[in-house]
Amino acid sequence: MKEKLHEIIFEAETKVGRLFDLVLLWLIVLSVLTVILESVESLNQKWHAIFDFLEWAFTILFTVEYLIRIYSVQKPTRYIFSFFGLIDLIAIVPGYLSLFAFGGGSLLVIRGFRLLRIFRLLKLGRYVGEAEVLLSAIKSSRYKITVFIVTVLSMATTVGAAIYLIEGKEHGFTSVPQGIYWALVTMTTVGYGDLAPQTSMGQFLASVVMIMGYGIIAVPTGIVSVELAEAYKNKPLNTEACPHCLLEGHSADAVYCRVCGNKI
């Protein structure tokens, strides 16, 4: 029974497994839509009873699903404290907290985290390989991205200190951190407009930072693109999940888990 439930809930290779994931997908979307509509005061006043009923229906269904997931895995604690295990728990906690806490509307934000559960459904068919490739590319490029971010922050600190010395408090740059904030906003081409240099030297510096910004934006895109090309060479092709460590995305011909070595 455990093996059958695990195959249905954690994998999408079988017809029943795909059906389970599709039903769960619609439940997640509808539950998040309920949260969104409930936040509209006029709708909440008119349909509060319906929203309350739907919320409890989703909570009960997600609770049953959560308990079945715990039952179907060989190491329940590994699932409970995993990323998706915690997200699954967050999906049901607000409903029960509303029984004891006042101001249940404050739990709307937590309930909105249910949308994160959609990511576990990316294992459906054609999405599993692409999701693994993307994660692999991001993981491989993390050191390059880290160096890039440190470089950008160093440049922003230098420019922020310079603009503070050039413009001064009389033009709104009251501190170096304020100057760093302006440098980051300008460098990323966001341009809120709450701070703007008034002197000729400050405007010249701003022009240089703006031009630099276009080049800076392209760097992480190039880094991830190269890693994506490399990751496509070894992308996994199936949705089998290891019943021991819950790892997904094994090769199509895999018999044993590539991390824990147990049979999948």
Image (cartoon, rainbow, N blue to C red):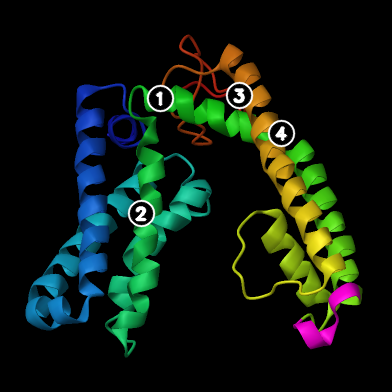
Q: Amino acid at mark 2?
A: Leu
- Point out the tag, 3 or 1, that comes first from the N-terminus: 3
In whole angstroms, how far apart are the C-alphas of marks 3 and 2? Answer: 26 Å
Q: Amino acid at mark 4?
A: Ser
Q: Is residue 241 magenta?
A: no
Residue under numbered circle 1: 239
Residue under numbered circle 4: 141
- Point out the tag, 4 or 3, that comes first from the N-terminus: 4
Residue under numbered circle 3: 228
Q: Amino acid at mark 3?
A: Leu
Q: Position of residue 90 (x, y in %)?
A: 40, 63
Query: Number of labelled discs?
Result: 4
Residue drawn at (32%, 64%) of the image: 92
Q: Is 41 above or below relative to 29?
A: below
Residue under numbered circle 2: 115
Q: Is residue 169 magenta?
A: yes
Residue 21, image quadrant: top left
In whole angstroms, how far apart are the C-alphas of marks 4 and 1? Answer: 24 Å
The magenta stretch spans which residues?
166-172
Q: Residues within 10 Å of mark 1 (few under 14, many from 20)?
A: many
- Point out the tag, 4 or 1, that comes first from the N-terminus: 4
In whole angstroms, how far apart are the C-alphas of marks 3 and 1? Answer: 20 Å
Label 3 vs label 1, nearer the camera: 3
Q: Is 50 above or below relative to 222?
A: below
Tell whether label 3 touches label 4 (CB within 8 Å).
Answer: no
| Secondary structure category for the residue under label 2 | helix
